[in-house]
Amino acid sequence: MKQPTLLALATALVLAGCNGSSNSNSSSNTGTTPPTTGESALEKALPLSIDVFGVTIRATANIDRTKMLHAAQVMAQYLDNDENGLVDNEAVVDKLVASKATLVMVPKESDMQALGDKLDGQGTIQDLYGAEVHPGGSKPGAFDATLEEVLHLITHGGYSQVYPKIFGEVPESQIADAMDQARGGRFTAIPAKYPEGAWYTYDDSTCDYSCMVTEYTYWALTSLLGAQAYEGRLQEIQQEWTLNTPDKVQLGDPAAYSLLTNGEYGLATKLPDGNYSYKTFTIKGG
C-alpha cells in the first residue's frame, strides 16, 4: 500500500501512512480555462485546479479529468455530507483554507517525485495518484484511494487543528488514546510485535506517532461508513486493521465509535460515492 504525503505549512514534513463516480453532469464537464498570468512555481507545475468550498485540488496537465472531478466530488461529500450546499463544520473548512490545504493529483508516484521542492512551503499538501483513483467504486484489488487521501487531508489539516484535545495527532488526545487501545499500548515507534488482541497493527517504520493517528482515524471512520466491507477486503487489510465493518467497530472499538459518531463534529455519516448532487465542479487552468 502506498504511503501518502502530508506537507505541513512552511516545512516539507513527510508523514508516512498507508493507502489503501461523478454524476452525469459533472463527469462531462471537463473543459478548461486559460491560466492567469503571474503563476507561481506550484501553479506552473500543477496548472489544473478545482475549488471545493475554498479547499484546492491541483493537478498536472496529464491527469485524467474524470478522476480529478471524482476527487472533487468525494471531497465535497466529506465536507457537506448531507449535500445541501453548506459545509457541515465551518471551523474545520476555515482551518483547511487558512492552511492552504491542497490535494495534489498526479498520474503516478514518479510524477509526484518529479515535482521535487516545488511543494515546499506551499501549505498542507496531500498527494493522490490517478492510478489509485477508481470512480466506479472500490472492488477487490482496486480500492478507491480517493476515500483515504481526501480524508487524510481533512482530518490532518482540519480536525486535528480545530480540536487538538479531541482529534490531535499527539499522545493523550482522545483519538490518540483510542488508538493506543487499538494497538495494545502507546508506542512512539513500531514495536517488534504488537500485543495479542491488537486490532490496529500497522508496521511501516517510517510512520511516526502522528501519522499513526491519521491512519487510525481513516481506518475507523471508513469502516464505520462501510468502505472496507466489500468481499475480499478484509484479506487485503487485516495485517493492518481487522475491524472492517460498522458492527465490528461499534463492538470492538467503542472509544473510536463514540468519537467518530458524535454529531457535534460534523464528520461524515454516509460514505462518499463521487456523486455530489448540489453542484457541478469545473476544472480551471490547462
Image (spheres, rainbow, N blue to C red):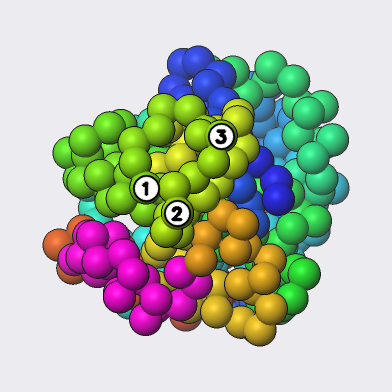
Q: How many marks?
A: 3
Which portion, as a residue range, is magenta? Answer: 243-262
Residue 283 vs residue 168, the one in the foreground: 168
Q: Left or right of 149: which side holds 92?
A: left
**Amino acid under disc 2:** Glu
x, y percentage for residue 272? 49, 73
- The kind of secondary structure element at disc 1 is loop
Name the residue located 55 percent from the left edge and 79 percent from the top edge: 229
Q: What residue is shown with label 3?
A: 192
Above or below residue 90? Residue 157 is above
Decide: few, some or many residues near mark 1? Use Cα within 10 Å; few <14, some 14-19, many ≥20.
some
Q: Mark 2–mark 1 contact, CB under 8 Å?
A: yes
- The part of the image, by quadrant, that contains residue 188 is top left
The residue mark sitting in front, 2 or 1, is 2
Q: Position of residue 173 (x, y in %)?
A: 22, 39
* Cβ atoms at labels 1 and 3 below 8 Å apart: no
Q: Is residue 282 left or right of residue 34?
A: left
Q: How packed is label 2: few (under 14 Cα within 10 Å), some, or many (20 or more)?
A: few
